[in-house]
Amino acid sequence: MDTIQLPEKVKYIIQELRADGFEAFAVGGCVRDSLLGRIPGDWDITTNAKPAQVKQLFPHTIDTGIEHGTVTVMLERDGFEVTTYRIDGEYEDARHPKQVEFTQNLTEDLCRRDFTINAMAYSDETGLIDVFGGMRDLEQRVIRCVGRADDRFDEDALRIMRAVRFSAQLGFSIEQDTLRSIASHAGNLSRISIERIRTELTKLLLSDHPERLLAAQELGLTRVFLPEFDRMLATPQENPHHIYDVGAHTIHALQHLVGRDTQLPPKNQLILRYAVLLHDVGKPAVRTVDAAGVAHFYHHAETGADMAREILRRLRFDNETIGSVGHLIALHDYRYASENKAVSERTVRRAVNRVGPDWLETHFLLQEADLNAQNPALLPDKLRQLSEAKALAGRILSAGQCISLKMLAVNGSDLIAAGFPPGKSIGAALDDLLNYVLEHPEANTREELLARAAALLEPGKH
Ligand code: ATP
Ligand code: MG
């Protein structure tokens, strides 16, 4: 295990509190991550000082959750949550503690925390405070509840999702009794707000072990917040392209992304992981089996895009994420050529136009993940086509070929100046010109397009 190196600002906060006679420690996720050699996302501090006393000691603080004992101490631009030792009261609805009670006892504070690996505290003066065997569980790589698992999940069912999410982020297993208790409390998840569930699902998907979604399904969790995934696992694909059912295929596709999508901006990475999760969500609904026993999934991309948008709305995602995931799913099955045929630049130009240059890299990664989770016997030709498409797309873009209305050599005002009546017909004419230029990239000149537009103006000539 690594040693804990507190950042200077954390040391400063702890020292200030100690100088005034209080206890103070770094606690929770930052201690866990430091010991694992991972970079903590944030540093939380726990203290027996009351919020008012913390506020007195530091000139810049924010009342983040003062009724729960949390004050954010600002040092320059960095904020650190300093929370008073507390005992969480009885939980009202498997979610909210009815009241919190402050305490002077660190162990009582550690005891309200969810898992042993999250219930350790540290200061340079005291070293590691590990009351519940967190260190042992870090070494054995297990997620285990602090205290009785049944009680802990009764208090807060979100911990069910957190257990699976941490197991995916850290590659840990879940201890037997904790696992048993999760399965028996799965139904309580329905009382947890969908936003909080979504946060955990997103972290699970973005982790190095997105396949832990299968554990979530086996434990009865996805049935509560993503029953569509349960249907995917129950949908076989009897055709030459596939060797897995829809659910297993999806999991393999997600695993393919690990280590391969890190170069994307974080927002695109999230969108891609949800797009891969849901790219075939339409398949169960459109599945048909022909006389020869072969399964078909006609129009599953469009159906899937609609369903994905609905699911993401249900998960309360923002419109941009919903739109982008839907867009990628609608086009995920885009074919560039028939089997064993070369890919034409023209087909790729149309694809670039439909996908849009900003989404191209993400789109290709989605296709790569999808293909790699299909029948390996057919993979080489599919990958060859994909790599030809990528190379051609690169060439089309670097040559500055027109692939959008924006890049057309004429715009609406040009057409109006050329005598087109303002109105709907302008849009139709521009679409026609773009369509033409997508076939004939060399035709994207003012002269040629105005001539073509003029011809369009004269009935009978076109
Ligand atoms: P990360 O920041 O990577 O999501 P974390 O463990 O720091 O992981 P936070 O949500 O930041 O998680 O919470 C900080 C600490 O608060 C946890 O380590 C844990 O000790 C405690 N904690 C958070 N949520 C709960 C919960 N639902 N039940 C019990 N303890 C919790
Ligand atoms: Mg944290």
Image (cartoon, grey):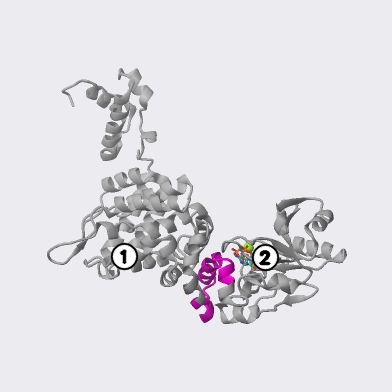
Would you place residue 306 above or below residue 404 in this image? below
Task: In this rendered view, identify the residue nearer to me: 256 or 155.
Answer: 155
Q: Residue at x 66, y 79 (%)?
A: 132
Left or right of 392 on screen, residue 220: right
Is the N terminus in the top left, top right, bottom left or bottom right quadrant?
bottom right
**Figure quadrant, ligand 2:** bottom right
Residue 144 appears at what percent x and percent y? 57, 77
Image disc number at residue 302: none
> Which quadrant would residue 398 be assigned to in this image?
top left
Neighbour tally class for label 1: few under 14, some 14-19, many 20 plus, Cα within 10 Å: many
Kindly identify the amino acid type of the residue bearing the numbered disc 1.
Val
Left or right of 430 on screen, residue 359: right
Left or right of 97 on screen, residue 157: left
Task: In this rendered view, identify the residue nearer to me: 278 or 8.
Answer: 278
Overall secondary structure of the magenta section: helix
Would you place residue 392 above or below residue 444 in this image? below
> Label 2's element?
loop
Residue 391 visible: no
Q: Which residue is mark 1?
A: 246
Outermost left residue: 291
Task: In this rendered view, identify the residue nearer to me: 383 or 302.
Answer: 302
In front: label 1 or label 2? 2
Q: Which residue is mark 2?
A: 89
Q: Which residues are magenta?
A: 152-180
Residue 191 visible: yes
Q: Residue at x 28, y 66 (%)?
A: 235
Q: Residue at x 82, y 58 (%)?
A: 53
> Which quadrant would residue 462 be assigned to in this image?
top left
Left or right of 255 on screen, residue 161: right
Residue 131 is inside the magenta segment: no
Instruction: Give me the C-alpha separation between circle 1 and circle 2.
Output: 44 Å
Neighbour tally class for label 2: few under 14, some 14-19, many 20 plus, Cα within 10 Å: some
